[in-house]
Amino acid sequence: MQQKELIPQLYRNEFRKMAAVLCRLFGIEHITIAEDIVSDTFLLAAETWGLKGIPENPVAWLYTVAKNKAKDFLRRNDIYNEKVTLAIQHAANAKNEFEIDLSNTNIVDSQLQMMFTICNPCIPPESQVGLALRILCGFSIDEIADAFLTKKETINKRLYRAKEKLKQLKVKIEMPHEQEIGSRIDNVLTTLYLLFNEGYFSAGRNSKIRKDLCLEAMRLAYMLVENKTTNKPEVCALLSLMCFHASRFEARIKPDGELVLYNEQDRSLWNKELILNGKYFLNKGATGSTLSKYHLEAAIAFWHTIEIDSIEKWENILSLYNKLLIIEYSPIAALNRTYALARVYGNDTAIVEAKKLSQDHNHLYHSLLGELFALTDNKKAIEHFLLAAKLTRSDADKKVILKKIEKLNQKVS
Amino acid sequence: MKEFALLFRNESNVGSEITPQQMELMSSKWQHWVGGIAAQGKLVSPGSRLGFNGRVVQPGDNVVQRPYAEINQILSGFHVIKTSTLDEATEIANDCPILSIGGSVEVREIIPMNN
């Protein structure tokens, strides 16, 4: 492999591992230094490999350089005396040399601990997602800025403030106690859910970045499932939900970024393997007594993977949306429930219910009403679609809506 | 927005007369009705269902075996909703499936605790 391709690939795979281990070793007050050391390591790799060629084992090379840089930092810093010397004293062969553990086990442990540290409600959700992308996923600041459709400076500021806050509150980098995991894991799942949705639902980004965000969220959720202490039913349910959604990734976005609505998707493009994985984790999550919103959403997503539109399918979806809304209201779930209602009881019933939702400022509300009127009242349907087109901020959505209007206009003439 | 409790009453022996199919229909009707309230963001709490068995403790060591059986209408559950007015809450209660089996809904404003 050429150096040009190798370094970005190593960056994506190895940055996060080294960063997590060093963050955990240095403590919350030095996570920026941990990041910098790993970044410097890659910089040095780019320079050195360019001159001398790629080493035989590039990963080992990176680890050695990062370890040495970390040791230099520790020696120069007080934390060496406070923490590290203590650790060495405990070690059996107390040599002067301190070993930095970049074994697979320690990498995974460190990443899990960092996950609990970063997914902390003391910092705003978008900062949690940003920090997760940086430290747990190894995204560069440029990539994070692209993912949030914002400027590099904004992301730098956001991450800086978040790290300061964690430092100020002296958040410890450690696993919660086993009895505490049940309540702490909610925060982690909320952030992973947000990260996934950022990729899946927010239009306007290129599809490569969107897919990467989804895959990273799935990778992190899978880490939680793989670990005995964090393998909770709601974690399996969330991963199942992600698998079902991701199974439609190719079908719902055209290469040019245009969205394809569920009903119009080429179902042969649905990824069968991801659907199977989704079912597997849904079953694994069906234990215990908790029925989380992730269970309900995963079950809804499961019914959406069934190709045939039977009454049974939509009755189940409707019932699940009812239960979901009773647990937690969200405008989008309310609209989806109304759509399911239309599929079971007909558009007229659904229109009456839709009008009670008071979501006049939501473009999706008008898209739904446009859809519901389309069969019976062309004029009203077009009115609502026009409002939707006016209200949406996404070009991809606008394209879809304008196409609908065009079709309805053709029907009139 | 104000909070209102919807208190459901129905005949205490109604359970014995309905078939499992009717029961299922009732529960699906009920779920749609509550789902509809939740979809408007107006459900505060789905509350609880109350069993028919119970006792009423009165002063002077007087324990009544069945709660207010003499009026033949028993409190069977409650929800808490939020709406702008009592009228709006009443309108929601008016769609309650319990009305179709001879029950009633009492709509009562909840007084916020000041502590």
Image (cartoon, coloured by chain):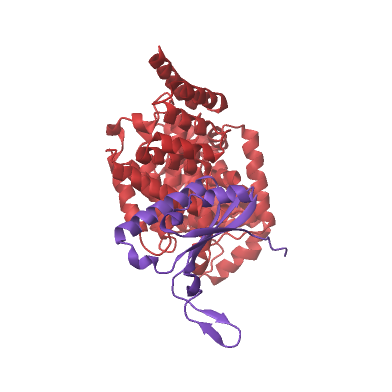
Chain colours: A red, B purple
Image location (x, y in percent) of residue A305 = 32, 41
Q: Foreground: A283 or A38?
A: A283
Count the marks: how many?
0
Image location (x, y in percent) of residue B60 = 60, 87
Image location (x, y in percent) of residue A369 = 47, 31
The residue lying at 30 percent from left, 61 percent from top is: B20
Q: Which residue occupies the extreme top position in the image?
A: A413
Q: Quadrant of residue A89?
A: bottom right
Q: Foreground: A246 or B60?
A: B60
Q: In this view, does A159 lie above or below B115?
A: above
Q: In this view, does A9 lie above or below A164?
A: above
Image location (x, y in percent) of residue A28 = 62, 55
Quadrant holding the C terminus of chain A: top left
Quadrant holding the N terminus of chain A: top left
The residue lying at 40 percent from left, 50 percent from top is: A320
Q: Which residue occupies the extreme front position in the image?
A: B70
Q: Foreground: B15 or A236?
A: B15
Q: Foreground: A342 or A192?
A: A342
The answer to whether any part of residue A38 appears in the image is: no
The answer to whether any part of residue A128 appears in the image is: yes
Q: Quadrant of residue A224?
A: bottom left
A30 to the left or right of B114: left
A116 to the left or right of A256: right
Q: Which residue occupies the extreme right position in the image?
A: B114
Q: Quadrant of residue A410?
A: top left
Q: In this view, does A24 lie above or below A341?
A: below
